Every structure is written in structure tokens, then in C-alpha cells.
Image (cartoon, grey):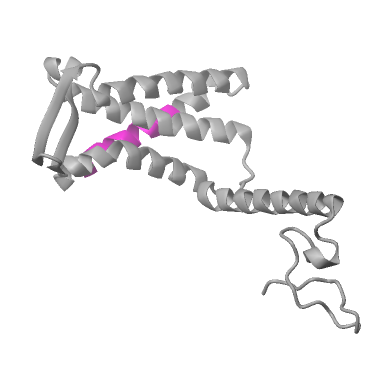
Amino acid sequence: MRPKCKGTKRDGSQCGSYPIEGGAVCRMHGGGAPAVKAAAARRAAEAKAAAEMEAAAVTLGLPVDIDPAKALLDEIAVTYGHVQWLRLKVQELGADELVWGRTQTDQGVGPQGPVDTTTEKAGPNTWYDLYMREREHLVKVSAAALRAGIEERRIKIAEDQGTLVAAVLQRILAALNLSPEQWAEVPTIVPRELRALSAVE
């Protein structure tokens, strides 16, 4: 319940009005004074920032204590799994598909009536683009691990774990006979869920 103004009436009873935003008193009891308004605005901004931080914590997850070396190794394992799996997806593509493909599909009803058009143009295939980006990320996290003094043997173990994950994913997704729409969600869902799994280990 929203608090009432802390000011008092002439008879000594508490004011029944609501205070200005971020303040403790209403305009009639000093809430309109420049200094009071400035302090109230500052408190309102701080409260808003705190609410946004709380919302972000819910969305992104709360802080978790983790050993930096383990965090790097977990990231290597997950990323290496992505690389291995995406490599399989790229190998399934034909030579033409690597540099030419659908970039946009418009379906529905427009100003002139029904719309059903497909746009194709030259450019790196989405799977190939994702594969190259994950390879770059793998190089970065591996280099960071080496700079941190994590021995190569432990990095190799993390990479082997990633290979196993990629193989299992490939078998599962192949067995599901996904529709094109479901396949379009895979590049988003798979990395997100793998990183979530790594975070709780």
C-alpha cells in the first residue's frame, strides 16, 4: 500500500494526501520546494535503477561463485561441442549452399493482397557463419585458458567432452525429424541450453 504524506494537519492529525514521487511529503507540506523535489527525484531514480537491476538478475541469472579455471574449461567444452556439431551441419551442405541461399521469406496478406515471396542471394550460409564464429570464440577461450596457466591436458579433456556432446546432439536432432521452422530455432536453443547445463555442473 502506498504510504501517505508524513506532514500533519493543523489539528495534529496526519495528512491524508500522497507524497510526491520519491518523497515523504506532499506539495502542501514542502514537497514543492526545489531542494525537496531534487532529493525526491534522486531517490526515485535510485529506486528505478534498483528495480531494473533486480529484473536483470531474474532474466540473466543470479551471480554464482565459480573457480575461474573451471569457468574457462566449461566454456571450452561447450564451445568445442558447438564447433563439432556445426561442422557436421556444414558438411551436410552442398557446395552451392555455402555461398547462395534463402535470405528472406515473406508470407501473409499485404496491401495488394496475399504475399508469398522468397528472396535468395549470394552470401555465407547461416550454418557456415555460425560455425566460423564459434571457431573464433573457441580460439579466444582456449588462449585465455593457456594465459591463465591451465595445462593443455585439462583443455584437451574439455574439448573431448565437447565432442561427445556434439555427437549426442547430432543423433538426437536427426532422430526427431524436425521441421524447417524447428531447425531454424536450433542455433538459438542448443547453445543456450548447453551453457545453462554447464552453469549448474
Q: Is residue 39 above or below residue 185?
A: below
Q: Residue at x 36, y 31 (%)?
A: 81
Q: Position of residue 1 (x, y in %)?
A: 67, 74
Q: Position of residue 113 (x, y in %)?
A: 9, 42
Q: Is residue 98 above or below residue 34?
A: above
Choose top left, top right, bottom left or bottom right for residue 134.
top left
Question: Which secondary structure is most common in the magenta stretch?
Answer: helix
Choose top left, top right, bottom left or bottom right for residue 157.
top left
Q: Position of residue 194 (x, y in %)?
A: 40, 41
Between 108 and 79, the one nearer to me in the picture:
108
Q: Residue at x 51, y 50 (%)?
A: 59
- Any magenta on residue 18? no
Taking the image as shown, residue 190 lies to the left or right of residue 74, namely left
Between 191 and 200, the one nearer to me in the picture:
191
Q: Is residue 194 at all visible to an observer of this figure?
A: yes
Between 98 and 20, the one nearer to me in the picture:
20
Taking the image as shown, residue 178 lies to the left or right of residue 16, namely left
Question: What residue span does the magenta drawing correspond to?
Answer: 158-172
Labels in figure, total: 0
Between 130 and 166, the one nearer to me in the picture:
130
